[in-house]
Image (cartoon, rainbow, N blue to C red):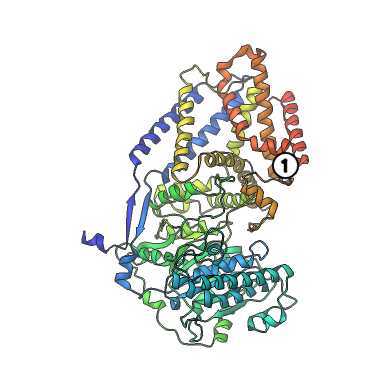
Amino acid sequence: METESRRLFATESIGGRAVYRLHAVTVAAGILLLLYYRATHVPAAGEGRAAWLGMFAAELWYSAYWVITQSVRWNPVRRRPFRDRLAARYGERLPCVDIFVCTADPQSEPPSLVISTILSIMAYDYPAEKLSVYLSDDGGSILTFYAMWEASSFAKHWLPFCKRYNIEPRSPAAYFSESHGLQDLCNKKEWSLIKDMYEEMTERIDTAVMSGKIPEEIKANHKGFDEWDLEINSKDHQPIVQILVDGKDENAVDNEGNVIPTLVYMAREKRPQHHHNFKAGAMNALIRVSSVISNSPIIMNVDCDMYSNNKDTIRDALCFFLDEEMGHMIGFVQYPQTYNNMTKNDIYGNSMHVISKVELRGFDSVGGPLYIGTGCFHRREILCGRRFTEEYKEDWDGGIKEKKQEHVYEVEKKAKSLATCTYEHDTQWGDEIGLKYGCPVEDVITGLAIHCRGWESVLNSPTRPAFVGVGPTTLAQTLLQHKRWSEGNLIIFLSKYCPFLFGHGKIKLRHQMGYCIYGLWAPNSLVTLYYVTIPSVALLKGTPLFPEITSPWIAPFIYVFCVKNIYSLYEALSCGDTLKGWWNGQRMWIVKRITSYLFGVIDTLRKLLGLSQMTFAVSSKVSDEDVSKRYELEIMEFGSSAPEYVIISTIALLNLVCLVGGLRHFMTGGWNARLNAFSPQLILCGMLVIINIPLYEAMFLRKDKGSIPFSVTLASIGFVVSAFLVDILVPIV
C-alpha cells in the first residue's frame, strides 16, 4: 500500500472484458463454421465455382484480419497520473521541456492558425524558464516568420492574462470563439482589451498573407526579416534560425515582469538537388538545432493545427517519466488526437473515437501505443537512438544546469550549421538516430523502432483533451489523409520493418499484431472491392453464393454478421458516437477501402518496383464558405472528377442495377422464384444500396457545386454497362 501511494500514476484494467472474451470466442466459433462450409460446399465447375472460391478467399482474409484486431481488444487499460504527488515530491524541480511545432505551407496551414497553437503551448502551467518552443517552417515563408514575430509580442499580454484568470483553453482563437464567452472571473475591460489586441494582430497577419508582402516599416523591427530576399522560395533557401525570445535574457519578460518561454523560428536549408525527407527531416533538424539552444531532456511535438487544450498536460506527462518504479522504462507518452470541428454525426468518420478509446488503450496493455506523430512526449535520448537497459537512469538535472552563456548571434550561427542539407550525409540520422526516413508515416516506424529497442510507451487520455485540432472537412481531404496513412503502413509491413520480422523476439506477439492492424489497412481494399461487387453481380446472374435462408448453415453467417455489427455499434456508442455517426462510419469504411486504400496498394507497388518516388501531400486546413456550409449540414462533398469518385459512383450504380434486376427476376418468377437461395445476396445488395443513398442523391438529385459532376456519373454508367457486356462474353461468376 505504501508503494502504491508513492506511485506517480496508476494503471487500471477496463471492465467488461470477461463478457467481451465470451463474445469473441463465439464469433471465432462462427467464423470457423463459416469457413468449414465454404471449404466443403464448393460448387461444380460452371456453376459459379470461381466466384465461390473468391468469396472463400475474401472471408479467409477477413477472418485472419479479425483475429489480428483482437490483439488490442483483449485487455485494454487506462492510465491515471497523480499530479498532486508530482508537485509534493518535486515542487518546481522539474526537467526542462522542448516543444516542437511543424508547419509546411502558409496557404494550407494559415499562419494565424499556427500562432494560436504556439501561444497555447507557451502558456502551459509550467515554469516558463524551463520551456522552449520551436517552430519548423518547411515552407520557409517570411509570412510565417512575421506571424511568429507578432505572436512573440502578443505573448507578453496573453501569458499573464491566462495565468491570472486560470483560463482554458489557452489558444486565443479557441478561447475567443463563440463557444467561449466572457468568463465570470475575468475583468470585462481587460477581456475586451486582450480580445481586441488578438483580433487586430490576426487581421494584420491575414492581410499580409493575402497580399503576400510584409510592410517595410515592420521589417525594420527585427533582424530576422533580413534573411529573406527575392531569390528565396520554399524549395530553395539557406538555413534560417532566429531566436525571437531568448529565455535566458533578463529582458525577455511579459508586461508583468515574468519570464517568457524561449521562442525559436527555424527553416532548415532546402535545395532542389537534395531530398529533404518531409516532416521526419524537419523533426531531426529541430532535434539538432534545439540541442545547442536549450537541449532539454524531454521533447514534445505537436502539429501546427493541434492547440493545447489542457494547461496541465506537461505535468501529467512527467508523472510517467518521473515515476520511481516504472518511469525508467517509458520512452514516450502519447496523447490521443481530438478534433473540435467534427459534425454531430461525423459525416466523414474522422473522429477516430474507437481508435483512441479502444485500440490505443489495447496497445497500452502489451507494450504501449504507437507514436502517432503529434501530441507526444519523448525522452531526447531515445530519439537519438539510445537502447533501453535495466541500469538506465535519466539525469534530469542535466537540462536544468546553466550552460555557458553565448551571444545569441553565435548560438544562431551554430544552430544554422546543424540545419543544412549536407549535415546528415554519411551519418546515422534518419536510420539509427532521430526519426526514420523513407516512409510516409515516419512516426509509426520510429515508434516501432523505439519499442524494439526495449522501451515502452503509455497512453494518457485525460477527461479534458490535451490537444484539440482541425480534422478534414471534405471527402477529398479525408481520402488523401487515409491514402497517405494506409500507404505508409503498408510500406512498413512489406519492408524489413514488418512488425512480425523486425519485432520478433523484441516485442510481444500481440504488440506485433497490433501494429499490423494498420499495416494491413491497404490490402483490405482488394477483398472489400470483391465483396461489394461479386455477390451483387451473382444475384443478377442467378448464381447463389451463400447457404439457403432455411439451411442450418446460414446460422454462422447470420451470427457473425449480426454480432460483429452489434458489437461495433456498441463500441462506437460507448466511445461517444451517435447511431447515425456509426452508420456514416460504415459508409466511410467502404468508401475508404475501395479508394484510398486501393490507391495505397497501387502506389506502394509502384514504389517497390521503382516506378515512382515517395511524396507527401499536406492536407489543407481551409475550406471556402459554401464547402463549410455543406459540411455543417452534413452533406457529402464531391464537386470534382477525381478517379476516386468514379470508383465510388460505379460501385454504387452497380449495386443499384443488380438489386433492381434481382428483384425483377423474383417478381416475374425467374429462377423458379428461389427466394431461399438468393435472400442473403438480396439483403447484402440492399444494404449496400441503402448505405449509398447519399451518392445517388449527389449523382441524380443535387444541383449544388458539391454534387457529383455529370461527367463522373456518365463515366460510371459507362463502366457498369461495359462490365455487363464483358460478363456476357466472358462470364465472371
Q: Which residue is drawn at 75% across and 37% down?
A: 713
Judging depth in this view, the residue of 307 and 368 nearest the camera is 307
Q: What residue type is labelled 1?
A: Ile
Q: Which residue is drawn at 60% across and 38% down?
A: 526
| Relative to 517, 9 lies left or right | left
Mark 1 closeness class: few <14, some 14–19, many ≥20 residues within 10 Å: many
Judging depth in this view, the residue of 295 and 208 nearest the camera is 208
Quarter of the image that includes the C terminus: top right
Quarter of the image that includes the N terminus: bottom left
Q: Residue at x 63, y 43 (%)?
A: 598
Tell me residue 544's x, y (percent). 59, 21
Q: Is residue 272 visible?
A: no
Judging depth in this view, the residue of 495 and 327 nearest the camera is 327
Q: Is residue 61 visible?
A: yes
Judging depth in this view, the residue of 477 and 698 nearest the camera is 698
Q: Look at mark 1 in the image and give the residue it sits on.
A: 708
| Relative to 622, 55 lies left or right | left
Q: Residue at x 72, y 30 (%)?
A: 723
Where 649 sits versus 576, above or below?
Answer: above
| Relative to 47, 428 lies left or right | left
The image quadrant of residue 21 is: top left
Q: Is mark 1 on a helix, strand or loop?
A: loop
Tell me residue 569's x, y (percent). 47, 38
